[in-house]
Amino acid sequence: MAADSPPLLLHVEGLRKRFGDNVVLDGASLDVPRGSLVSVLGRSGAGKSVFLKCLVDVMQPDAGRISFDGRLLSAGDPVARAEFRRRCSFLFQSNALFDSLTALENVALPLEQTTRLADKEIHARSLEALRQLELEAHRDRYPSQLSGGMQKRLALARAIVTKPELVLFDEPTAGLDPLRRNAVFAMIAKYQRQFGFTAVVVTHDVPEALVASDRVALLDNGLMCFEGTPAEFSTSELSVVRDFRDSTSALGSSLADIRRVPAPQPADS
């Protein structure tokens, strides 16, 4: 990072993870400046979600170093790990909302489980989170009664109610059509700036990530083979970046070649 860049909130160095003979992460490293929105790109199955789960201690990496706010998160330092969990939130790909709880109860749950706040304060903070994400009118509804976009906002309200410094998003646009992908990235960018948290988003949606992010990284063959600004990604001549970035153009060229070949004529009956 340049000398005038924001200080790092998260530093990942040489992360390794394998499952039997399958090496998923083979020395992946990443720098996340404080206050930034960083997208980790990669094809499906590249290990993006495994990388994220190693960060939040859902999975144990086989090797590597993770530092948060300058403090190493080692397995032998449970205090540092507990501090990291207190200052970090994780937004699951599936939203992971509880169907049996109302919107307000879903948002209140992290405060009930991780703080000693009085019930009145938990209620007030949960209502405020819903208000900030324009969901206060739906406080008594259940997740199944909300649209897909509202469910995404509800999951984000639950993630930010503890006022985290870092929010990690696991494939937040998986399975969505282009318009809804745009809306989700716009939501993340809007509230990241509004609330001032640092965001790490793992995704394979290149156009949306390039527009919304401050920095992007590309995970391929277990390594972060690129890390830089969206503009640098868009002009990079690295073959692995070009292949991933320009895959749609490559498809168009292949189809054009196919269409230039005359179609076989049906045989006479």
Image (cartoon, rainbow, N blue to C red):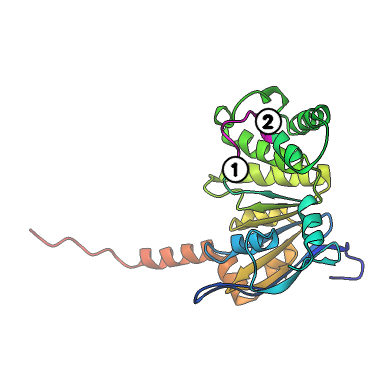
**Label 1 is placed on what type of residue?**
Ala
Proximity of marks 2 and 1: CB atoms separated by less than 8 Å: no
Q: Main secondary structure of the magenta part?
A: loop
Instruction: Name above or below for residue 118 compared with residue 231.
Output: above
Say whether residue 257 is visible: yes
Q: Residues within 10 Å of mark 2 (few under 14, many from 20)?
A: many
Is residue 111 shown left or right of residue 256?
right
* Upstream in sequence: badge 2 or badge 1: 1
Quarter the C terminus occupies: bottom left
User: Which of these two is toward me, 7 or 85?
Assistant: 85
Segment colored magenta: 97-106
The residue positioned 79% from the left and 29% from the top of the image is: 119
The residue positioned 70% from the left and 35% from the top of the image is: 107
State the mark number for residue 96. 1
User: Which of these two is toward me, 143 or 61?
Assistant: 61
Q: Regarding mark 2 in the picture, which secondary structure is present there?
A: helix
State the mark number for residue 105. 2
**Label 2 is placed on what type of residue?**
Glu
Is residue 21 shown left or right of residue 28?
left
The residue positioned 78% from the left and 56% from the top of the image is: 82
Q: Is residue 101 magenta?
A: yes
The residue positioned 13% from the left and 62% from the top of the image is: 267
Residue 50, position in %: x, y? Answer: 60, 63
Q: Regarding mark 1 in the picture, which secondary structure is present there?
A: loop
The residues bearing labels 2 and 1 have C-alpha atoms spaced at a distance of 13 Å
Is residue 229 shown left or right of residue 181?
right
Q: Quadrant of residue 110?
A: top right
Residue 26, position in %: x, y? Answer: 62, 76
